[in-house]
């Protein structure tokens, strides 16, 4: 048993959907969340820069005495996971592998859609990881750049959201995919609208959920679950504009964000 | 007479709407355009960083022997204009002042709307500049974060664009503004949709157009117009992903983008 917190970082507020799933599945764990809001978006940065940022975020979390690190950011997961693993002596998991493995297992016709930011789709991270698990999968990636601002505006149930989803998902419906990976931390919030447009026959894979499942297995196998069954402690850190994280983040986490602090990250 | 080129820089492709107006009003001028696409968006960076970037962009343009510099980026115009002016011995103009002055002149009821990115609206740059020209103006700033991705998707005539504009502009219609500043370089492309939603009685101020007018006056007054009436030469530089600039930029410039080069900007 180990009551040290779980560390989660993302380039912004999106990773709070991962935290939400972790809370759901591991309700007694303490959690430290870091949103690197000063340097968002990671997607347009070079690999070298993204690795540096991921190491800095992990160094900060390590200073908070975390027992494991969850990279909740799709870009950092695809570019920097191995790098972070090699640099720290605690377990590290990302969101790409759990999401890809789950999609490869779920599909029946081998046709899988992946939606994400332009950076994530262009990186091919989900597509190639899915094909590691299912060699003859047909994977169609669609960048959906309007989805993040729609979610951040709180417009997830609006006609704008529905019409936008129709424009983006049309091609996936035509290709008859039976599985769709929500390859961006913001997208689970649009789940209802995406479901309506893509139809009820398509399985939606939420990598946040799959990652929380993997994390639970990992803590169980390593015997480092927190067995102190009291109200857990949550701490939040942002490298810029903490008030924005508080305001927008509540919708992601479905709970109030207290214990929120601003930190300097550049010199870690 | 002076046949050296005009230098224009922006954090990305948006400044091409300014270049378009410059071409329209100064059809014989040679132009060097720089999109600092590696470091977009500027809006979320600190003032110090934005000033550094603006100096680097201007240093690059100066190395191309420009006779004047146009800061086409709203963020850099509001934060770094004076700084760039003090660092170079050629005239420098930004987009905020021409747009604000024109709005202050155009309004009759003193009620002016300004739309822009969240960063531009929160910076209060247009709002405070307008009030320098018209002390008792009532200025209402509305951030419209979906407009940039809508334009970059090429969806400016879509129902998504119309519904989004309705959501954003509703408050301005209610407040009975008679003048609206398109305070983001992307927005002139949405002009048709914005016009439809805001109504024909409202004057739309396009700072790109006003800036090109100011530039023409400046070159005329200083007697440095190019009087070589041949086909002018346009050169384009991007600090990252030049192909994206070419692909998206055509829609902004309404002409093909040739003579496009990628440059390293960090070490200038």
Image: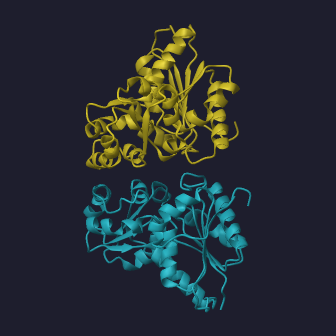
Chain colours: A yellow, B cyan
The residue positioned 37% from the left and 27% from the top of the image is A107
The residue positioned 27% from the left and 56% from the top of the image is B163
Name the one closer to the observer, A183 or A104.
A104
Q: Residue A85, position in %: x, y? A: 65, 25
Camera sees residue A95:
no
The answer to which quarter of the image holds residue B142 is: bottom left
**From the image, which quarter does the N terminus of chain A lie in?**
top right
**From the image, which quarter does the C terminus of chain A lie in?**
top right
Q: Is residue A244 left or right of residue B53?
A: left
The answer to which quarter of the image holds residue A3 is: top right
Name the one closer to the observer, A265 or A130.
A130
Camera sees residue A223:
yes
Q: Residue B52, position in %: x, y? A: 68, 59
Q: Is residue A149 left or right of residue A242?
A: left
Vertical side of B41 occupied by A105: above or below? above
Q: Residue B33, position in %: x, y? A: 59, 70
Vertical side of B156 occupied by A59: above or below? above
Q: How many callouts does the rendering have? A: 0
Vertical side of A76 occupied by B249: above or below? below
Name the one closer to the observer, B181 or B129.
B181
The answer to which quarter of the image holds residue B88 is: bottom right
Q: Residue A100, position in %: x, y? A: 47, 29
């Amino acid at each position: 048993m180990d009551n040290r917190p779980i560390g989660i970082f993302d380039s912004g507020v999106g990773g709070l959907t991962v935290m939400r799933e972790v809370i759901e599945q591991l309700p007694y764990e303490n959690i430290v969340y870091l949103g690197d809001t000063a340097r968002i978006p990671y997607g347009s940065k070079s690999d070298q820069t993204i690795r540096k940022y991921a190491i800095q975020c992990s160094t900060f979390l390590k200073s908070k005495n975390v027992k494991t690190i969850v990279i909740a950011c799709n870009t950092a997961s695809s570019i920097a996971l191995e790098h972070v693993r090699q640099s720290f002596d605690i377990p590290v998991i990302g969101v790409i592998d759990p999401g890809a493995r789950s999609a490869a297992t779920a599909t029946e016709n081998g046709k899988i859609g992946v939606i994400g930011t332009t950076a994530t789709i262009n990186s091919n991270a989900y597509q190639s990881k899915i094909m590691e698990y299912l060699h003859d999968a047909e994977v169609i990636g669609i960048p959906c750049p309007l989805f993040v601002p729609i979610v951040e505006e709180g417009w997830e149930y609006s006609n704008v959201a529905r019409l936008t989803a129709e424009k983006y998902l049309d091609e996936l419906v035509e290709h008859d995919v039976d599985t769709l990976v929500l390859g961006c931390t913001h997208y689970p919030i649009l789940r209802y609208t995406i479901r309506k447009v893509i139809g009820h026959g398509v399985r939606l894979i939420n990598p946040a959920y799959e990652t929380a499942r993997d994390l639970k297995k990992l803590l169980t196998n390593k015997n480092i679950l927190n067995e102190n069954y009291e109200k857990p402690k949550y701490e939040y850190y942002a490298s810029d504009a903490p008030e924005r994280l508080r305001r927008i983040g509540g919708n992601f986490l479905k709970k109030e964000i207290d214990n929120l602090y601003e930190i300097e990250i550049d010199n870690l």
